[in-house]
Structure formats: structure tokens, C-alpha cells
């Protein structure tokens, strides 16, 4: 399965007011593994950022001047995400900006180019109702280090969100798939050729004897047989 974790930075909150995308970051996962094949661009919006937005991302108009316009990277972006499942935190926000940029170019809406969109914010609210579920809070909750994050950045936030998403959904894939050593993984995109082999590690005689001793001790303490003892 190919998934793309996507994030944007913008000049403000409302594309209908003429605000634009100034950074796009996309992190590729194949079979729940980082591939290192990412997409990232800073973009010249041709306008200033709102003061509140500038405090969030720190991307000044001077820094962005001379960078590519969205129109110059749109084909590359759509080729990169084509057919993938997209993961976005607070998806309506990013999709509204992407759709507005594409509409200026006469291109169909973003969803029509991809294989569905997952909103990780909706997932987090369902899993942790009543709690803070922004990216910083989720990093803390799932043990993802964001110590190097002083300002928002689309690629950095995409990488952090990818780690959070994998932690949030770890139980949805079998541990055999999720935790196997890299040497036992097939290359990205390949199909598994057959059923996974199950390995059984049996206790030695000494380990079995020690287990029996512990159960006997528990039974003596409780004054009744341990319910998990041998029949």
C-alpha cells in the first residue's frame, strides 16, 4: 500500500480571501515504511503572510521571493500523489487550499487524483475524545520526539505526522508485518508470494519445571489451583 502524508503552510487561514500555499511537504510510506522518496517545495505566493501565520511558520515574503509558483509544481505534485492514499491532519483546511490552487489552473479537485483521504485529526478525536489532539499533543502522547520543531514546516510536520499515524494505527496491521526485521521485508510495492510462516518457540524442560513451580506457589498462596495452570 502506498500512502502519502501531506502538509501545507499558507499565508493565512482562508483561500477564499486570496491566501495561498507557500510550502508543501509530502512523505511517502509504502507498506507502512518510510521510503525517503519525499516531495517538498517552498512557493512564492506573490503576497505577504498574515502576521499570525508568519508567527507560526516564519516564512517571510523575502525568503519566498523567487521560489517557484504553485503552477510550476502542480504537475509534479499530482504525479507524486496519483493513486495514493493521502493522510492529512485537519484535512478540510489543506484540501481547501489545494483545491483553490488547482481551480486557478482549471484542474479538477485534489481528491479526484488520489485514492482517498484520511483525516488523522478525526481519527485522533475518536481515539482520544475531549483531549488536545494537535500534532504537538499527539507527539507527546505517542512518544514521537519533536524537540527539533520550533516553527511549523510542511515537510517536518509531515514526517512527524507520519510517525504519529503509524503509532496510532499500529494495531490495524499484524505484528508480523509491522515489526519484522528489514532483511525479511520484500522490496516496496511487491506482493507477498505466500502465507507467512509461523515459528513456535517451545519452552525447555528446565523452563517448564520452573513454570510449574511458580504455579504451585501461586496456588498455595491463593489456596486454590491457578486458573491458567495445565489441565
Image (cartoon, helix red, strand yellow):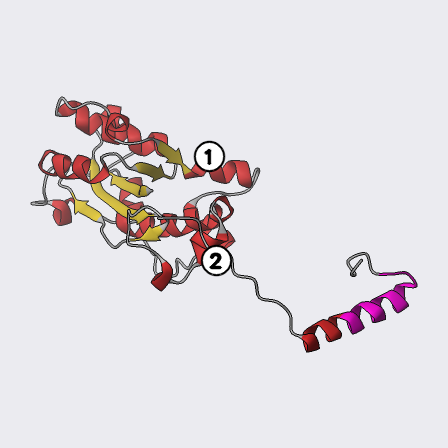
Identify the residue at horizontal 42%, vertical 39% (top origin). Answer: 120
| Lateral position of residue 117 relative to residue 60, left or right | right
User: In the displayed structure, would residue 157 be above or below residue 89?
Assistant: below
Q: Can you say which quadrant of the picture contains the C terminus?
A: bottom right
- Is residue 75 within the magenta segment? no
- Residue 218 % position (x, y): 83, 67
- Residue 191 % position (x, y): 32, 46
Identify the residue at horizontal 19%, vertical 29% (top origin). Answer: 101
Residue 187 visible in the current orientation: yes
In the image, 115 versus 49, the foreground residue is: 115
Place residue 106 in its image quadrant. Answer: top left
Q: CA distance from mark 1 to mark 2?
A: 20 Å
Q: Which residue is mark 1?
A: 122
> How would you rate the neighbour count of disc 1 (Cα within 10 Å): few for under 14, some for 14-19, many for 20 or more?
some
In the image, 99 versus 36, the foreground residue is: 36
The numbered dot on residue 143 is 2
In the image, 30 versus 102, the foreground residue is: 30
User: In the displayed structure, would residue 60 be above or below residue 217?
Assistant: above
- Please report the bounds of the magenta region as a residue range: 212-225
Is there a contact, CB below 8 Å, between mark 1 and mark 2?
Answer: no
Residue 13 visible in the current orientation: no
Q: In the image as oriented, which residue stretches furthest toward the left?
A: 66
User: In the displayed structure, would residue 197 be above or below residue 79?
Assistant: below
- Residue 116 % position (x, y): 34, 30
Amino acid at each position: 500500500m502506498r500512502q502519502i502524508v501531506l502538509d501545507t503552510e499558507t499565508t493565512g487561514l482562508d483561500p477564499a480571501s486570496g491566501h495561498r500555499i507557500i510550502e508543501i511537504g509530502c512523505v511517502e510510506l509504502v507498506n507502512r515504511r518510510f521510503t525517503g522518496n519525499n516531495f517538498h517545495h517552498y512557493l512564492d505566493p506573490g503576497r505577504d503572510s498574515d502576521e499570525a501565520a508568519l508567527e507560526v511558520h516564519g516564512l517571510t515574503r523575502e525568503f519566498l521571493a523567487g521560489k517557484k509558483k504553485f503552477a510550476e509544481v502542480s504537475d509534479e505534485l499530482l504525479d507524486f500523489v496519483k493513486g495514493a492514499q493521502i493522510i492529512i491532519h485537519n484535512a478540510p483546511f489543506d484540501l481547501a487550499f489545494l483545491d483553490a490552487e488547482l481551480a486557478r489552473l482549471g484542474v479538477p479537485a485534489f481528491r479526484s487524483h488520489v485514492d482517498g483521504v484520511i483525516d488523522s485529526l478525526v481519527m485522533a478525536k475518536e481515539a482520544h475524545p475531549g483531549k488536545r489532539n494537535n500534532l504537538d499533543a499527539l507527539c507527546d502522547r505517542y512518544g514521537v520526539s519533536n524537540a527539533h520543531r520550533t516553527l511549523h514546516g510542511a515537510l517536518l510536520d509531515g514526517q512527524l505526522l507520519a510517525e504519529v499515524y503509524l503509532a496510532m494505527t499500529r494495531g490495524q496491521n499484524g505484528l508480523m508485518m509491522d515489526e519484522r526485521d528489514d532483511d525479511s521485508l520484500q522490496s516496496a510495492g511487491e506482493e507477498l508470494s505466500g502465507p507467512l510462516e509461523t515459528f513456535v518457540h517451545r519452552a525447555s524442560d528446565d523452563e517448564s519445571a520452573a513454570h510449574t513451580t511458580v504455579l504451585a506457589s501461586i496456588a498455595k498462596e491463593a489456596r486454590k489451583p491457578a486458573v491458567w495452570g495445565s489441565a
